[in-house]
Image (spheres, helix red, strand yellow):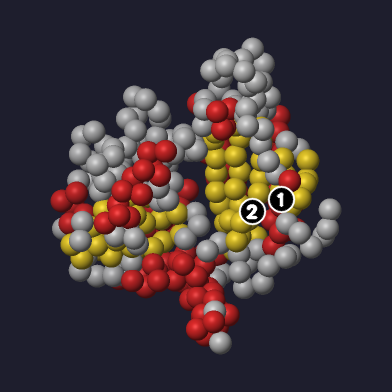
Amino acid sequence: MSHAEPIAWLNGNVIPFRDACLPVFDLGIVQGATITERLRTFRHTPYLVEQHLQRLQSSAFKILLTSPLLDELDQAIDQVARHNCSLIDERHDLSIVIFATAGQAIGDTNGMLAESKPTVCVYSAPLPLASYSSAYHAGVPLLTPTIRQIAASCIDPEIKMRSRLHWYLADQQVRQRNPKAQAILLNDNGELTETSSGNLFLVRDGQLLTTKRGATLAGISQQFVLQLAQENAISIERRTLLPDDLLRADEAFLTSSTYCIVPVASYESTALPSVPGPLTTQLQRMWFEQVGMDFVAQAKQAEQDQTLRSPQGS
């Protein structure tokens, strides 16, 4: 294996990233029986690793997945990040992906195996920083598709999983209306939930609103923003959010472990009054201080570098 190529960690072994493959009969492929986490680096250092691994362990417990390899993930993340970050520009960063599948099943077993060793993997990918830049400044349009959030009575929304066909269909549907839009799903009660990449926050009269506990995936970045707000005496309320709440919001934003905070530009083609809003910008700056870097400026620089490298910029 060349030191100049990226690596992955698969079932306890460090291998070239190009060799990180699953058998076609892995239950992650056959049934989508996969839990996952995605975190990012800041200045090439993995961020909030403990929180992500705690949530992965919670997901594993809820789907009855056990493996001693889960206890090795902290070191695996560090190893993959250190090596793969050494291959990229010092101004750029990586996303780190962890996933574990229910194992492998040859034949028509429907996943009902007496014994199956889970597949556990860690790999990385460059963050699409240039594509984040316009979202940080112009905001993201949100649209609601006809597809609804999976009911909690079917799958606990706090399991971070890769059974994501409904998200794929939802995003495909809204992008037929607006190629830059993200889908924000409603549940069967007509309440706002989340997008395929992040949690929703609204701002109304200086108060920060987000979904109540248990209604969506418990976002690591969502919790971090709530912590920042609490530390800075910003009023918080967790409650049921309806489409009309978003339409009447002073500002809104999404949180994710990769892009951190991006403003919402509009909902169902109704523009929000302030993009990015003052509280959104304030929380971004608080985050900059916590991690020691301006991720909005990082994305802008990546966008400028990409323009210079393109034929139009030459």
**Looking at the image, is mark 1 or mark 2 earlier in the sequence?**
1
Task: Give the percent coordinates (x, y) of residue 155.
Answer: 40, 28
* Residue at horizontal 62 percent and vertical 27 percent from the top: 25
User: Pointer 1 and pointer 2: residues touching (CB < 8 Å)?
Assistant: yes
Q: What label does residue 210 carry, if any?
A: none
SS of the residue under disc 2: strand
Neighbour tally class for label 2: few under 14, some 14-19, many 20 plus, Cα within 10 Å: many
Disc 2: which residue: 124
Q: Quadrant of the C terminus?
A: bottom right
Q: How many marks?
A: 2
Percent coordinates x, y for residue 297 in the rendering? 49, 76
The quarter holding residue 54 reads top right
Q: Residue at x 53, y 18 (%)?
A: 110
Whole-angstrom CA distance, mark 1 to mark 2, is 9 Å
Residue 215 seen in the current view: yes
Say which element carries label 1: helix
Query: Dot 1: within a 10 Å radius of its alpha carbon, few (fewer than 14), some, or many (20 or more) residues?
Result: some
Residue lying at 66% horizontally and 36% vertically, measured from the top left: 22
Image height check: is 127 above or below 116?
A: below
The front one of 180 and 133 is: 180
Residue denoted by label 1: 17
In the image, residue 35 lies at what x, y percent?
Answer: 54, 35
Q: Quadrant of residue 108?
A: top right
The answer to whether one can see residue 208 in this image is no
- Amino acid at the residue labelled 1: Phe
Task: Residue at 76% x, 38% y: name it.
Answer: 12
Nearer the observer, disc 1 or disc 2? Answer: 1
Residue 107 vs residue 55, the one in the foreground: 107
Q: What amino acid is at disc 2? A: Ser
